[in-house]
Image (cartoon, rainbow, N blue to C red):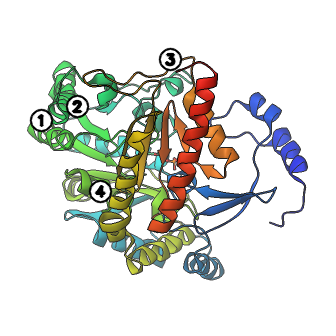
């Protein structure tokens, strides 16, 4: 769309008509939105011509960066040939079939089937209905309970937000829906005991699942769901011992294990799927975002053979689906996106080159007076801002709830042409996978500048 209005005109029309997601409408209208008008590679531009380094890949999704010709051409070709047809009427389109086949070929052994949705939230709604259907078909309809974690993010539909563990979301709209319960997240900063090792903490955090299963009764539990690394919850990287122990507990009780790969899938952690990096074998995987690099909406569920065999061989109708399940244009773009990721070797590049490089740069941030910890996995990282650093046995001191250092830092990022997200006082990056080490250097220089400015400000405010 031509960029035909002034910033003030766009802002006025935006405030008058557009209700943004997860937004205080009144506060934003008073402040005015930033209008993003174009993008190329890892950069965005706003309506005032400012160039912005997008260290969040849009919203954790633009894995191949902006402006990739092959994705644009795939969409155009498919729009010309067949812009839409459904998969309800005993019909299918070539892009949807080819994409399901392609995803199965990229996934770990035992994943042969794909159910398409329009988004990650719809994918997780599908998970709820599919796991309960699975147990119904096996003659165990009382297995209804799905266990998730505090501070998880699994989407914003009724089931997605219920699976999620966000207190602010549960406080609106009568959530969670019945049969969904939560355990604590494996976040050492909040839950580790004094002197507890990382490995011991990982095992103890996994044992909370066992306790919850005992509390609910194992014969009532259908599944456990988790993001390999919690994203929107603040990039919480669990200890290496956590997921294998979760797997063991699920196996022991016969409970389905679901990996929400909406952020971690398609190369973000240096493997095709985050569960491969974190060392576990789920029965089902939700995906979205990186499957099309966000160029067009698409999500879905990868269904492992344990569940697929029951649904297919014993199933009858599965009364669930969406108009856009297997949308041909979205699937064509996804195929072009996966081809590009393969041709450019992006998954290996993150694993062997840019991921380890980013990890070293984050480690070097530890010397900054504002940084408690700075950690990464693949191209996903978090910096925890603290008011006093750890000293000897003394743990780092967090900012008070009335000291939103993350918000101050985010404002400095905004002012300095960098998009980093603030989750409380954790500053988050998840840059495009096409990023080079030279661009990582550029990002790190921007991050340091913004940390310095934030440090000066919190000192002036007397917060440290
Ligand atoms: N799961 C995870 C792990 C996510 O991060 C998100 C979105 N941030 C979702 C599900 C929901 O995806 P969508 O916004 O496409 O519905």
Please tell me which residue is depicted at 15% across the width and 33% down the height of the picture: 203
- Answer left or right for 79 relative to 284: right
User: In which image quadrant can residue 403 be found?
Assistant: top right
Residue 450's label in the rendered image is: none
Please tell me whether mark 2 sits on a helix, a strand or a loop: strand
Separation of disc 3 and disc 1 at Cα? 41 Å
Q: Which residue is mark 4?
A: 303
Nearer to us of marks 3 and 1 is 3
Dot 4 or dot 2: first in sequence order is: 2
Q: Position of residue 216 (x, y in %)?
A: 22, 21
Q: Can residue 235 be seen at all in this image of the molecule?
A: no
Separation of disc 4 and disc 3 at Cα? 44 Å
Nearer to us of marks 2 and 3 is 3
Dot 3 or dot 1: first in sequence order is: 1
* Classed neighbour count for the residue bearing mark 2: other residues with Cα under 10 Å, few (<14), some (14–19), many (≥20): many
* Classed neighbour count for the residue bearing mark 4: other residues with Cα under 10 Å, few (<14), some (14–19), many (≥20): many
| 117 vs 423: above or below | below
Please tell me which residue is depicted at 67% across the width and 34% down the height of the picture: 23
Q: Which residue is mark 3?
A: 400
Separation of disc 2 and disc 1 at Cα? 9 Å
Q: Position of residue 179 (x, y in %)?
A: 34, 27
Q: Which residue is mark 1?
A: 253
Please tell me whether mark 4 sits on a helix, a strand or a loop: strand
């Amino acid at each position: 769309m031509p960029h035909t209005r002034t910033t003030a005109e766009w802002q006025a029309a935006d405030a008058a008509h557009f209700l943004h997601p997860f937004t205080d409408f009144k506060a934003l209208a008073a402040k005015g939105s930033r209008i993003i008008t174009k993008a190329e590679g890892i950069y965005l531009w706003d309506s005032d011509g400012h160039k912005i380094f997008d260290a969040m890949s849009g919203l954790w999704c633009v894995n191949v960066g902006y402006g990739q010709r092959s994705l644009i051409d795939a969409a155009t070709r498919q729009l010309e040939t067949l812009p839409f047809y459904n998969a309800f009427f005993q019909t299918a389109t070539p892009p949807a079939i080819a994409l399901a086949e392609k995803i199965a070929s990229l996934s770990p052994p035992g994943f042969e089937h794909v159910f398409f949705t329009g988004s990650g939230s719809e994918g997780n709604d599908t998970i709820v209905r599919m796991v309960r259907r699975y147990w119904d078909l096996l003659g165990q309809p009382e297995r209804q309970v799905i266990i998730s974690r505090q501070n998880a993010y699994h989407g914003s539909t009724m089931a997605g937000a219920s699976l999620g563990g966000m207190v602010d979301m549960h406080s609106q709209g009568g959530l969670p829906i019945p049969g969904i319960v939560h355990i604590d997240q494996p976040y050492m900063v909040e839950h580790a005991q004094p002197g507890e090792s990382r490995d011991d903490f990982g095992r103890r955090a996994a044992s909370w699942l066992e306790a919850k299963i005992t509390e609910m009764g194992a014969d009532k539990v259908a599944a456990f769901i988790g993001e390999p690394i919690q994203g929107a919850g603040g990039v919480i990287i669990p200890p290496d011992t956590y997921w294998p122990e979760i797997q063991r507990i699920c196996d022991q009780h016969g409970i389905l294990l679901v990996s929400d790969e909406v952020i971690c899938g398609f190369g973000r952690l240096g493997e095709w799927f985050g569960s491969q990096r974190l060392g576990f074998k789920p029965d089902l995987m939700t995906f979205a975002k990186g499957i099309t690099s966000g160029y067009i909406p698409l999500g879905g569920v990868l269904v492992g053979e344990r569940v697929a065999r029951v649904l297919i061989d014993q199933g009858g109708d599965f009364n669930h689906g969406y108009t856009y399940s297997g949308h041909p244009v979205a699937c064509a773009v996804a195929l072009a996106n996966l081809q590009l990721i393969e041709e450019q070797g992006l998954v290996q590049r993150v694993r062997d080159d840019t991921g380890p490089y980013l990890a070293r740069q984050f480690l070097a941030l530890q010397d900054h007076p504002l940084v408690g910890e700075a950690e990464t996995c693949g191209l996903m990282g978090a910096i925890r801002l603290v008011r006093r650093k750890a000293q000897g046995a003394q743990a780092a001191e967090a900012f008070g709830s009335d000291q939103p250092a993350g918000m101050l830092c985010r404002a400095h990022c905004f002012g300095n042409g960098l998009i980093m997200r603030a989750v409380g006082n954790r500053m988050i990056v998840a840059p495009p996978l096409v990023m080079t080490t030279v661009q990582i250097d550029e990002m790190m220089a921007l991050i340091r500048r913004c940390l310095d400015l934030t440090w000066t400000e919190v000192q002036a405010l007397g917060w440290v």
